[in-house]
Image (cartoon, coloured by chain):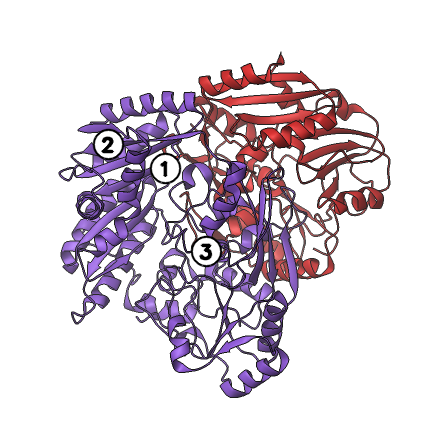
Chain colours: A purple, B red
Amino acid sequence: MNILYDERVDGALPDVDKNALRLALQTQLPDLEILHQREALKPYECDGLSAYRTTPMLVVLPRHIDEVQGVLRLCHERKVPVVARGAGTGLSGGALPLEKGVLLVMARFNNILHIDPAARTARVQPGVRNLAISQAAAPFGLYYAPDPSSQIACSIGGNVAENAGGVHCLKYGLTVHNLLKVDILTVDGEHLTLGSQALDSPGFDLLALFTGSEGMLGVITEVTVKLLPKPQTAKVLLAAFDSVEKAGRAVGDIIAAGIIPGGLEMMDNLAIRAAEDFIHAGYPVDAEAILLCELDGVEADVHDDCNRVRQVLEQAGATEVRQARDEAERVRFWAGRKNAFPAVGRLSPDYYCMDGTIPRRELPGVLRAIAALSAEYGLRVANVFHAGDGNMHPLILFDANQPGELDRAEALGGKILELCVEVGGSITGEHGVGREKINQMCAQFNSDELTVFHAVKAAFDPSGLLNPGKNIPTLHRCAEFGAMHVHRGQLPFPDLERF
Amino acid sequence: MGSEQDFDDSAALLEQVNQALENATPLRIQGSNSKAFLGRRVAGELLDTRSHRGIVSYDPTELVITARCGTPLAELSEVLDASQQMLPCEPPAFGENATVGGMIACGLSGPRRPWSGSVRDFILGTRVITGQGKHLRFGGEVMKNVAGYDLSRLMAGSYGALGVVTEVSLKVLPKPRQTLSISLEMDADRALLRLAEWGQQPLPISAACHDGQRLHLRLEGGEGSVAAAHDRLGGERLDSAYWQDLNEHRLSFFDEDLPLWRLSLPHDTPRLPLPGVQLIDWGGAQRWLKSAAEATFIRSIVEEVGGHATCYTPGLIDSPFQPLPDALMRYHRNLKRQLDPRGLFNPGRLYAEL
């Protein structure tokens, strides 16, 4: 079932006279940059999920918050859908435009407003890049902890909208754990401040509700994040295993030893080979799985923890345990992991990155099931895994130029996500639902739960003009999807081993 | 794991909610009633959550525990203790029989909060009986989960106004290998300055309180970092029971016969010129005030520095929680109307309008 907006199941969108809207915007906001010609709109027709494209009706690029407010008010009056976009790096199509909608690009709000070292906060505009915050805080020995792998390019507004993660979540949390305050504009352009400079605020925790709401409840205009003191030191251990099961068990053993690593990553053989071939990180290419375990903190503790983890890994049956000898080697070990996606990309014309989470104990069974699905669909799958927090990123290799392969990859991806739900996990750990996983939401939530989500939406955007069609599927869509794929009173994958 | 009183009573709770829906009777959701002194009084039929109790699952290597709302907080701590783990946010109990449900509804956190995060930060998933009379599941038992709106974390500190939380999954962590508490001779102004300075350094501080005379610190981490920090900071040893007494308001400060206020402030706010006595917790971000001053006066001072004030003395003022700006209140009411259209759950507990 196609994921592009389908008015038949996703709800009718108002018909808007493009030229009249453009004229009204120009008249009311004379300084606002508006793109409307075909070639100017082209760069905005997709975000990081580039397999899906829609040309927006208009793109607006405001430079002042007043203009954002003006755009929202006008669109609200005229019943025009608005899709907000930051840096456009999202992987779930959360900023996928609508043919009948305005794309509101927030990328020009890229000023760091204030770094306050004593308060350990940074107040920034939504278009500021994730990494730029840490760079601005570095002179004070501080940094912003969440580090999605797109951190060079992705913007903080998008991080908040998606509740972005990264490789250090187990110890340092997600975006939601590292925010103090977010300023938003509602669908009709009203300003609200959620959270505060203090650690809590009176009333409902709307800051938590808005984080990860995918642009459905309001448009983010300013963000205040917490900064942390930079850990004194970080060391990384690389362990090789002759089976994925053993590597999975070793992760549990590390936690059981009372150690919370700064980062704990796993890669399977296909991912190891791809990364080694690309980066020459020094990975053992014959290993069935490797673990990268980073320990950070105060020198003395990190030294102790390294010894403890080494022991745990050896006892868990690691065939080899290496500690990066110096900073250069540490960076190289990580470079292999951080470039795993493009490395896998070199093996195949296209790849499709999944984002399910599972309870860690389910890992061996889920990997076996993924291998079986991979064979069934005739597509290779490389596995990269935030092992510490149960977030898997299976990469499905395919060739979009081969008829039917994209559809097969999509179907295989859908099956993997449904598998995650079945074992008690989630269809998305950090990339968001967007449009990409809109159908799988029907597998994760029942219609009553979806109805509650629609009620939350209605509390903030009763006219449904903010980012229509994302995040929460209509019951109509689920009814059609259910009839085609899941449910039918029987479990999916009846031929697979259960666990 | 598991006690004789473990029981899944969710069907009865759901039945009572549906009955209340039918009769249009508001409900007063209550565990052990240990935090009755917080918020406004609720008129409504009692919905007692204590029969729905027990730990549903706990796997220490997954760092997740799932418990029913009526489970005593003490039982939760005991079970975690046995595996050398903890709920890092240290929720205060304010009573021996405090329940997990009350912990979520009030969302209060203890001395470690600025360094570890709050109750809401450790919530991974909930089961909730909604205003439509449905028993639903939001979030889950995994660390990362961004599917749908985050209704689970929204429940923390909502004082039962949005639904009955029947079950919660919480992230837990291993206890630190080493803990050491110290006390330093230092006045409050200087303590606030030092805390802001230390906060920018990788020191293993996990609690910081100034009682008017002395600065009390807790150091937690590995043996090496704790010893190094102790060498550097010096000070006298302090009994670690101090933090429990602070958390449960058992210090003599709290005996003073004056109204008690909780001030939540940016942690580096200088000492506030308010009548009465103050105790600084959370490294400056939470201050306890014993004062006879007018609510509006206290709130105007606190608001000016970007904070808010909650009155902990029941019955003193009509709105113990700081009133919300009009626009924000409007969206609170919209949300309440959407999730609890019949106004069933704890009407008026948080604000008269909700």
| Camera-nearest residue between A186 and A224 | A224
Q: Quadrant of the C terminus of chain A?
A: top left
Q: Are marks 2 and 1 in one subunit?
A: yes
Task: Name the chain letter of the residue that bears numbered label 1.
Answer: A
- Mark 1 or 3: the one toward you: 1
SS of the residue under disc 1:
strand
Q: Are marks 2 and 3 in one subunit?
A: yes
User: Which residue lies under the disc numbered 3?
Assistant: A162
Residue A492 in picture, x, y percent from top left: 25, 57
Task: Name the chain letter of the residue that bears numbered label 2.
Answer: A
Marking on residue A239: 2
SS of the residue under disc 3:
helix
Q: Is residue A467 left or right of residue A358?
A: right
User: Which residue lies under the disc numbered 1?
Assistant: A263
Q: CA distance from mark 1 to mark 3?
A: 21 Å
SS of the residue under disc 2:
strand
Q: Is residue A445 above or below residue B48?
A: below
Q: CA distance from mark 2 to mark 1?
A: 14 Å
What residue is rendered at 85% in x and 33% in y?
B275
Crowd around label 1: few <14 · some 14–19 · many ≥20 (10 Å): many
Q: Amino acid at mark 3?
A: Glu
Q: Are marks 1 and 3 in one subunit?
A: yes
Q: Amino acid at mark 2?
A: Ala
Marking on residue B143: none
Res. A490 visible in picture: no
Residue B230 in picture, x, y percent from top left: 55, 16
Residue A411 in picture, x, y percent from top left: 25, 63
